[in-house]
Image (cartoon, helix red, strand yellow):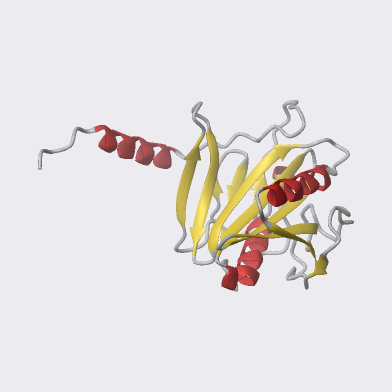
Amino acid sequence: MALFGRRKGAVGHGSGAARRDEVLDDVDTVDADDDGETGPYDEADAPDDQFARLDLGSLRIPVPDGAQLQVEMDPAGPVRAVHILTQLGQLTLNGYAAPKSGGLWKEVCGELAEQLRADGATVRSVVGDWGQELSASLGEVQLRFIGVDGPRWMLRGVVAGPPQLADNSAMGLRELIRNTVVVRGGQPMPVRTPLQIDLPQAIVEHIAAAQQGEQQPGQPG
């Protein structure tokens, strides 16, 4: 199920089938839905295409038509994540500092599998467009985790949705990842440091107005 329009061809990072991490015995292979135009893109290789991307500082994400945004704030103040709510479920992308040698997703994938199992989820390993993906069932929610190693960054995506839409949700997440631009920056950062999310001014003002409204004293009944 396509969520986005077509784009011009460009060469990006993450193309080809990467070797998967052998952390799970139950492994499935899915047909790649890559049409030869691959991302995600490093800022240096950002394509000159027709996508209108939401600029979040470290990430430029093409938000699907009709989607809603939900901002998750850290108690300390910084933005923890921006969730994209679609008909296929909730999609979330986060970028992290990674070593030049790559391979961070391989480590994170194994840790995620252990954490999900500890939470009571049923976990399967799936070989997708960029190598290993994780598919997990937790209660009435189906999760799909996808990671891509880039130049000194790792992009991790997750979609949470109803089980009956699991295949389409995974396709939607892959398409979102494939068209995202990662802005790592040149500053040194410890490995696994989350890349900073900066909200557009219009969203900042909207959140401030909503918070101000919640702080207004209630009218007597």
**Horizontal arrangement in the rendering, residue 146 relative to residue 200 (left or right):** right
Quarter-of-image position of residue 185: top right
Q: Position of residue 40 (x, y in %)?
A: 71, 53
Q: Is residue 65 above or below residue 97?
A: below
Q: Between 174 and 76, which is closer to the camera in this rendering? A: 76
The residue depicted at 65 percent of the width and 63 percent of the height is 175
Q: Confirm whether residue 36 shows in the render.
A: yes
**In-image side of 134 versus 201 (left or right):** right
Q: Quadrant of residue 19?
A: bottom right
Quarter of the image where the C terminus is located: top left
Indicate the position of residue 158 as horizontal and vertical percent values: 64, 54
Residue furthest out toward the left:
221
25 up-or-down from 107: above or below:
below
**Residue 50 shows in the view:** no
> Residue 131: x, y in percent?
82, 58
Where residue 31 sits, quadrant-wise, is bottom right
| Residue 170 placement (x, y as % from top left) | 65, 65
Kindly identify the residue that appears in the image at 88 percent across and 39 percent down.
101
Please indicate whether residue 102 sits to the left or right of residue 188 in the image. right
Figure disc tally: 0
Q: Residue at 80% of width from left, 57% of height from top? A: 132
* Quadrant the N terminus occupies: bottom right
